[in-house]
Image: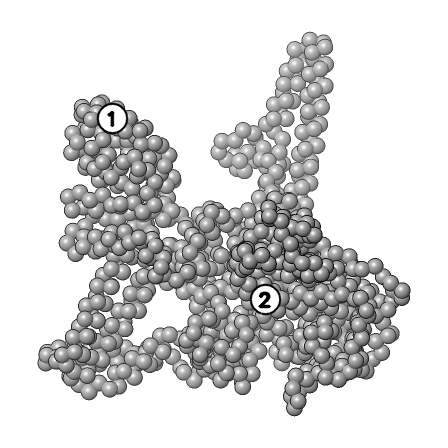
């Protein structure tokens, strides 16, 4: 785009004399053309008209626009070409309303070395896109863009030492989808925030934007750390302890430099080569950092970042050439050798000073403490990271963050792969972080949020609302506020209806009697109806005052009832998103109280000589039972489920299954399998098809019915209607275009819904759920709990979500149990399972392969006792 100075200079050279407001209008027309808001013919006609008024020929308009680089085919410029005139370079400048600029793109005039750098940048930007894409690796944030409002006059004002993050006018987009629009975000030091909202609303994307510093405007003094799974090959080859300690890159670099400098022995060729290698290493790190900044910045600061990148690359090339020359010739001047020896001493002192700030023994002890708290045993510390599953790798990443704390710690669903002891430990660890560390947690574990977070950030209506308090406090206040606003809205509507009826009656009476006074009264009432009905109190509960509470120009003298953040979202999409409907189990046959599944004195171990994983388990499951399992990882929960689902044969004991009983299983293994599916694969007819929820549901239904997949020429399905498949998916909230999207493009919560739908294909009598709340938002978790409570089939559920299990047990937050005797049929052999009733919920813990009845304690009581025992 054209800069004002360039435009004015060229206009003056063209001999055109115009008033200041005319010049401003003409310049705005140029900007409108470049923004695609007007055609080139309109711009040319406008310029010709002004040129004639300014004493120049109309024919001079076209050359004038040509000199500015404006022509008919250049209306939309994704990468604007710089205007080069008299050794000056001008690039884009984007003007925004109210003196603000969202990532404006501009560049300065320059000469000498700076002009060469800009020329190099210009040449670099003209590389064909195909060449660049072939060299660059896929970027998971490639389609994510984010920006904030920044004053163009205070671009450097953000470079302060303040640790508070203030983002105003925040926009976040993924492709063409806008997730946040003109939002406000404030993160204060030492405050723990809970970030909540529905699945797919942009919470994880916002954390990724902050963690990867995609926003040009984040304080440079603030260090962000987003906990992510470790997948780099070098990381995976490390031991678990070393992988945590490797996060201290400054110490590792300092140790490496000291090791290299330990061979230096005064002025010599070896000293010069060593120092030059360190220079190359420093410049390479500087180049990587400069490249990262240049790729993410735009505008004036983006240009400066790219100039620094080109300068850094130039110095790196020179250093590499000098190193190569030293190694090839083996010669160094005496003066250079002395200077390099002095430089070696300086580098050694700096590296020693950096190491002096770190206590290796204390750091290692802290790392071991964190790893132990997250569930690692001392024998695990030396195991290679690549031997661990994805969930344990996430724990290592979390251990890195807690060992070397940043200024802002970003946690995305940290409890998904943690058991109850680890969750309890993490709650304590976050509470005792250094005072300057802020924490932003995305989690759908309600109990965890209430225990950890001091403030709640709610993503809703593309905005971010802040509540000073925990999540339960926000829910309570939101419910009360919404009820208050609904009462006010109802009151205002009644008032308006009453005034309408009065106005109608008075108007009719005045028309019949032709009474002018009554006509005036009717007009007065009509004005009151139009102008004076609305909120009687302001947001603080005070009496409404026009000048104070409704400043500015408005059409009425009363504010309308504004629900703000409590306003309903799209009701149709919200209902579908939260809806969970399970298919009814098969009709009861013969004895309705007959067990669906029973385990008698079941023992199991995975290999001869290995310890027992299950020890004397007795289990009886009848229709309507809710069997809830809690306990630490590695105690036998998954093994018990595998045996119950006939996916694992027990070592000892008896397992009886009623003929015809179908079992549906939905757990982390099934969800992980779905997440690992390719984007495309070959179908039954050999054609490549997109892997979508609809395709997977079709395969599952056809397999369940014993049908072969058949496809019409027009793409329809024989034997299984698409409407039936969509109905099954819609029952768990997978509706509309979501059913035909690639599985890879769905969020974790959406894939969890698909897994649940696939588990229910055969209309199971028994539903086995392993951590079903992972990835689901809170509305869906509430809906799932409500559905499971009323479902007629039997449920075995393993979960570490305290609130979800309490919902299934119908506990209130303050209940400690005592009223929940009922349908579970677990026993460790010391109790008689037949003494309990049928069709209610029971809670059991599993420790070292043995089951213990915890129904009398209740979920909250058991968690409190477990937490107390673990911390002691």
**Tag 1 secondary structure:** helix
Q: Would you identify the image quadrant in which residue 14 lies? A: top left
Closer to viewer: mark 2 or mark 1: 2
Alpha-carbon span between mark 2 and mark 1: 66 Å
73, above or below 830, in the image: above
Query: Would residue 816 appear left or right of 520 to someone viewing this image?
Result: right
Mark 2 crowd level (few <14, some 14–19, many ≥20, 10 Å Cα): few
Residue drawn where x is 55% and y is 47% of the image: 461
The residue that mark 1 highlights is 48
Q: Position of residue 441 (x, y in %)?
A: 53, 62
Nearer to us in this view, 538 or 724: 724
Residue drawn where x is 76% and y is 69% of the image: 627
First along the sequence among labels 2 and 1: 1
**Could one spot residue 750 in this view of the protein?**
no
Res. 291 mark = none
Q: Would you identify the image quadrant in which residue 139 lies? A: bottom left
404, above or below 551, in the image: below
Residue drawn where x is 43% and y is 71% of the image: 232
Query: Would residue 826 appear left or right of 71 to someone viewing this image?
Result: right
Instruction: Name the colour scheme.
Output: one colour
561, above or below 662, in the image: above
Residue drawn where x is 51% and y is 65% of the image: 411
Position of the N terminus, as image quadrant, is: top left
Position of the C terminus, as image quadrant, is: bottom right
Nearer to us in this view, 721 or 781: 721
Nearer to us in this view, 65 or 847: 65
**Tag 2 secondary structure:** helix
Q: Position of residue 550 (x, y in %)?
A: 53, 35
Query: Would residue 248 appear left or right of 568 to someone viewing this image?
Result: left
607, above or below 465, in the image: below
Res. 673 mark = 2
């Amino acid at each position: 785009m054209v800069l004002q100075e360039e435009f004015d200079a060229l206009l003056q050279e063209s001999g055109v004399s115009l008033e200041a407001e005319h010049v401003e209008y003409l310049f705005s027309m140029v900007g409108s053309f470049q923004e695609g808001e007007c055609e080139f013919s309109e711009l040319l006609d406008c310029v010709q008209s002004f040129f004639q008024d300014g004493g120049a020929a109309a024919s001079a308009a076209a050359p004038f626009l040509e000199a500015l680089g404006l022509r008919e085919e250049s209306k939309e410029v994704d990468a604007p070409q710089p205007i080069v005139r008299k050794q000056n370079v001008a690039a884009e400048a984007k003007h925004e309303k109210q003196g603000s600029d969202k990532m404006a793109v501009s560049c300065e005039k320059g000469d000498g070395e700076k002009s060469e750098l800009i020329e190099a940048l210009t040449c670099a930007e003209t590389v064909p896109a195909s060449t660049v894409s072939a060299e660059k690796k896929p970027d998971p944030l490639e389609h994510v863009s984010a920006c904030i409002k920044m004053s163009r006059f205070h671009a450097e004002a953000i470079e302060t030492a303040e640790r508070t993050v203030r983002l105003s006018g925040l926009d976040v987009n993924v492709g063409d989808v806008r997730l946040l629009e003109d939002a406000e975000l404030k993160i204060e030091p030492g405050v723990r925030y809970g970030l909540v909202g529905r699945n797919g609303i942009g919470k994880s994307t916002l954390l990724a934007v902050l963690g990867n510093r995609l926003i040009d405007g984040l304080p440079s003094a603030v260090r962000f750390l987003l906990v992510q799974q470790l997948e780099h090959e070098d990381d995976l080859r490390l031991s678990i302890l070393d992988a945590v300690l490797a996060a201290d890159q400054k110490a590792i670099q300092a140790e490496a430099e000291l090791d290299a400098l330990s061979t230096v022995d005064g002025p010599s060729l070896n000293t010069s080569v060593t120092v030059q290698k360190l220079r190359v290493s420093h410049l390479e790190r500087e180049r990587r950092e400069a490249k990262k900044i240049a790729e993410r910045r735009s505008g004036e600061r983006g240009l400066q970042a790219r100039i620094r990148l080109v300068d850094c690359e130039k110095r790196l090339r020179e250093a590499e050439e000098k190193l190569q020359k030293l190694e090839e010739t083996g010669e160094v001047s005496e003066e250079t050798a002395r200077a390099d020896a002095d430089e070696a001493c300086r580098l050694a002192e700096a590296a020693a000073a950096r190491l002096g700030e770190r206590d290796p023994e204390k750091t290692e002890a802290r790392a071991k403490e964190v790893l132990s708290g997250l569930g690692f045993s001392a024998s695990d510390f030396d195991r290679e990271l690549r031997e661990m599953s994805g969930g344990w790798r996430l724990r290592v990443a979390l251990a890195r963050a807690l060992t070397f704390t940043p200024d802002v710690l970003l946690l995305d669903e940290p409890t998904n792969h943690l058991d109850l002891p680890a969750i309890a430990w993490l709650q304590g660890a976050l509470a005792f972080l250094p005072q300057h560390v802020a924490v932003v947690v995305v989690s759908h574990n309600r109990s965890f949020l209430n225990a950890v977070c001091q403030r709640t950030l709610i993503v809703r209506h593309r905005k971010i609302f802040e509540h000073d308090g925990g999540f339960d406090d926000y829910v309570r206040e939101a419910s009360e506020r919404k009820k208050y606003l609904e009462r006010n809205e109802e009151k205002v509507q009644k008032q308006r209806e009453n005034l309408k009826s009065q106005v109608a009656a008075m108007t009719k009476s005045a028309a019949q009697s032709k009474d002018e006074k009554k006509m005036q009264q009717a007009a007065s009432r009509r004005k009151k109806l139009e102008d004076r009905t609305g909120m009687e109190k302001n947001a603080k509960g005070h009496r409404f005052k026009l000048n104070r509470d409704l400043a500015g120009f408005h059409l009425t003298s009363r504010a309308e009832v504004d629900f703000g953040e409590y306003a309903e979202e799209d009701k149709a999409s919200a209902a579908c998103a939260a809806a969970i409907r399970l298919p009814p189990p098969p009709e009861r046959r013969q004895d309705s109280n007959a067990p669906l599944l029973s385990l008698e004195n079941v023992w199991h171990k995975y290999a001869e000589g290995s310890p027992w994983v299950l020890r004397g388990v007795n289990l009886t499951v009848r229709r309507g039972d809710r069997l809830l399992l809690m306990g630490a990882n590695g105690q036998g929960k998954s093994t018990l489920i595998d045996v119950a689902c006939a996916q694992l044969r027990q070592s000892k004991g008896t397992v009886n299954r009623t003929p015809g009983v179908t079992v549906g299983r939905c757990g982390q293994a099934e969800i992980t399998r779905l997440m690992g599916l390719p984007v495309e694969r070959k179908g039954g007819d050999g054609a490549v098809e997109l892997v979508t929820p609809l395709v997977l549901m079709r395969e599952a239904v056809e397999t369940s019915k014993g049908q072969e997949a058949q496809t019409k020429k027009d793409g329809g399905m024989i034997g299984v209607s698409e409407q039936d498949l969509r109905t099954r998916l819609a029952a768990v909230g997978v509706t509309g275009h979501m059913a035909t999207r690639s599985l890879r493009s769905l969020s974790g919560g959406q894939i969890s819904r698909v897994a649940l739908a696939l588990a229910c294909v055969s209309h199971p009598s028994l539903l086995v759920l392993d951590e079903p709340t992972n990835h689901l938002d809170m509305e869906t978790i509430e809906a799932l709990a409500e559905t499971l409570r009323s479902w007629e089939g039997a449920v075995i559920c393993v979960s570490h979500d305290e609130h979800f299990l309490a919902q299934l047990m119908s506990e209130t937050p303050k209940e400690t149990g005592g009223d929940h005797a009922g349908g579970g049929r677990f026993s460790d052999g010391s109790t008689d399972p037949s003494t309990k009733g049928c069709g209610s919920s029971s809670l059991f813990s599993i420790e070292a392969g043995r089951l213990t009845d915890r129904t009398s304690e209740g979920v909250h009581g058991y968690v409190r006792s477990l937490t107390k025992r673990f911390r002691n």
